Image (cartoon, rainbow, N blue to C red):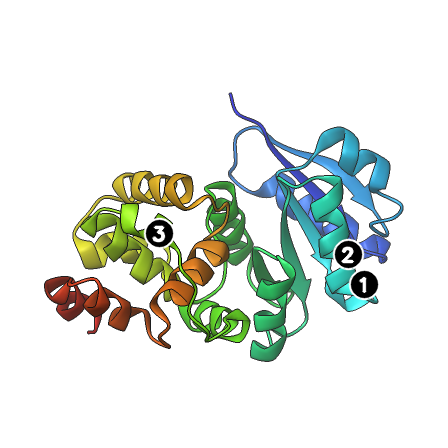
Amino acid sequence: MNVLSIGIISSQTLVRKGLLALLVSLPFSGLAVVVEASTVSDGTDKIIATKPGILLIDCEHCPVCSNCIRYIGVLSPSTKCLLLTDEVDEKFAVQAVRWGAWGIVSKRAEPPVMRQAIDKLARGEMWFNHGIMAKAVQALVRRKPVQDSTLDRLTPRETEVLVLLSRGFHNKQIASRLFLSESTVRTYIEAIYRKTGVKTRVEAALRFYKFTEVQTPAAGLAAKGQSKARSQLLD
């Protein structure tokens, strides 16, 4: 049985204990809380030793959240950071994507939302709406074109998946639009990662935007002669 290892970082004891109780109550088999600390510094040894799959970080009491996320990326590159905040502000969410966070959950959300977010991260997906993702990628993109032959190696279907991924769509949404199963979408995304040498959706989106030198990914398909696909993606 696969173990879903999770860590909790919050300076407030009641928040940590409340999250612990919530996680234990969620319907996940094999879930284990392997890190519980007041700060990332305090939890450094456990993070290194256990390399949790997901780390919940209470941003309201983390003075420099961006530094925390980057530090965790050094300690345990495979760990996905899920941020907890009082309000999911769009500007902050865009910054969070740029820092390397995998999602944000409001502390006012109902327990099922936390379950959905953890489930998405556990499956390698980010917990942001596609509008946030699109704006985050746009903010990171340099408009100057670069030569990148790696995207030429993608099949037409992989290109279609990459276009929607670059717009911030989740796997389920991509599957619906392209009339595929979610498992097939995951297979295509794995192939995209392998062929382009990236490890995350944001990196893949950045590679695509730079290659096409456009502000909307659908136009990139036109540049590659995929007019039929473009008509499907612009609805």
Residue type at the position of mark 2: Cys
Residue 29, image x and y in percent? 52, 30
Residue 58, image x and y in percent? 74, 60
- Tell which circle, 1 or 2, labels the residue nearer the N-terminal end: 1
Residue type at the position of mark 1: Cys
3 or 2: mark nearer the eye: 3
Q: Secondary structure at mark 2?
A: helix
The reply to whether residue 168 is visible in this rendering is no
Alpha carbons under labels 3 and 2: distance apart: 35 Å
**Which residue is pictured at 26% across the width and 40% down the height?**
184
For label 3, count other residues whose C-alpha is less than 10 Å away and answer few (under 14), some (14-19) or many (20+): few
Can you identify the residue that label 1 sits on? 62
Alpha carbons under labels 3 and 1: distance apart: 41 Å
For label 1, count other residues whose C-alpha is less than 10 Å away and answer few (under 14), some (14-19) or many (20+): some
Task: Tell me the tag on residue 149.
Answer: 3
For label 2, count other residues whose C-alpha is less than 10 Å away and answer few (under 14), some (14-19) or many (20+): some
Left or right of residue 66, residue 221 in this image: left
Can you identify the residue that label 2 sits on? 68
In the image, residue 56 sits, relative to residue 29, either above or below, namely below
Residue 71, image x and y in percent? 77, 51
Task: Tell me the tag on residue 205.
Answer: none
- Tell which circle, 3 or 1, labels the residue nearer the N-terminal end: 1
Q: Secondary structure at mark 1?
A: loop
Which quadrant of the rendered structure holds the C terminus? Answer: bottom left
- Tell which circle, 3 or 2, labels the residue nearer the N-terminal end: 2
Residue type at the position of mark 3: Ser
Residue 183, image x and y in percent? 29, 39
Left or right of residue 25, residue 143 in this image: left
In the image, residue 27 sits, relative to residue 131, either above or below, namely above
Quadrant position of residue 45: top right
**Which residue is pictured at 60% across the width and 65% down the height?**
98
